[in-house]
Image (cartoon, helix red, strand yellow):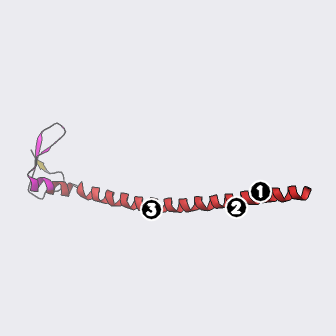
Amino acid sequence: MRWMMVIVILAAVATALVHFRRSEVRARHEIRQLDRQQVQLRRQLWDQQILLGEVTSPGRIRQIVQVGSLDLADRSGTVVQLSDSSGGAGSAVR
């Protein structure tokens, strides 16, 4: 009778151990997938930051404004026109 109880307890412990190991393997697999996804999302973020930096650079904005004949306004609302001379960034004619 005691041997039967010991065998049942050992079987229960073995079953629990197998269950925990399978859970651990699943968790490790999910962590690896999430790590891969995180790397991919970081690369996309870096690409978008580079693109945003290119689009919002002063030279690119000046080019867009000149090609599109757009007017710029400063914070007070005064229209600012860019000069055609190569005065560098920030040279504006009012």
Asked if residue 76 is among those painted magenta in the image, a careful observer would answer yes
Label 2 – label 1 distance at C-alpha:
10 Å
Label 3 to label 2: alpha-carbon separation: 32 Å
Q: Residue at x 77, y 57 (%)?
A: 13
SS assignment at label 2: helix
Q: Position of residue 10 (x, y in %)?
A: 81, 59
The quadrant in which residue 26 appears is bottom right
Magenta-drawn segment: 64-84
Q: Position of residue 58 (x, y in %)?
A: 21, 54
- Secondary structure of the residue carrying tag 3 is helix
Q: What label sits on residue 12 in the rendered view?
A: 1
Q: Dot 1, how many residues are within 10 Å of its Cα: few (below 14), some (14-19), or many (20+)?
A: few
Q: Which kind of residue does numbered mark 1 sit on?
A: Ala
Is 69 one of the magenta-colored residues? yes
Drawn side of residue 7 relative to residue 73, left or right: right
Q: Secondary structure at mark 1?
A: helix
Looking at marks 1 and 3 on the same chain, the residue that comes earlier in the sequence is marked by 1
| Front position in the image: 78 or 56 | 56
Residue 55 or 84: which is nearer the viewer? Answer: 55
Q: Amino acid at mark 2?
A: Val
- At a point 41% along the width and 59% down the height, the residue shown is 42
Q: Which residue is mark 2?
A: 18
Which residue lies most toward the right here? 1
Q: Which residue is mark 3?
A: 39
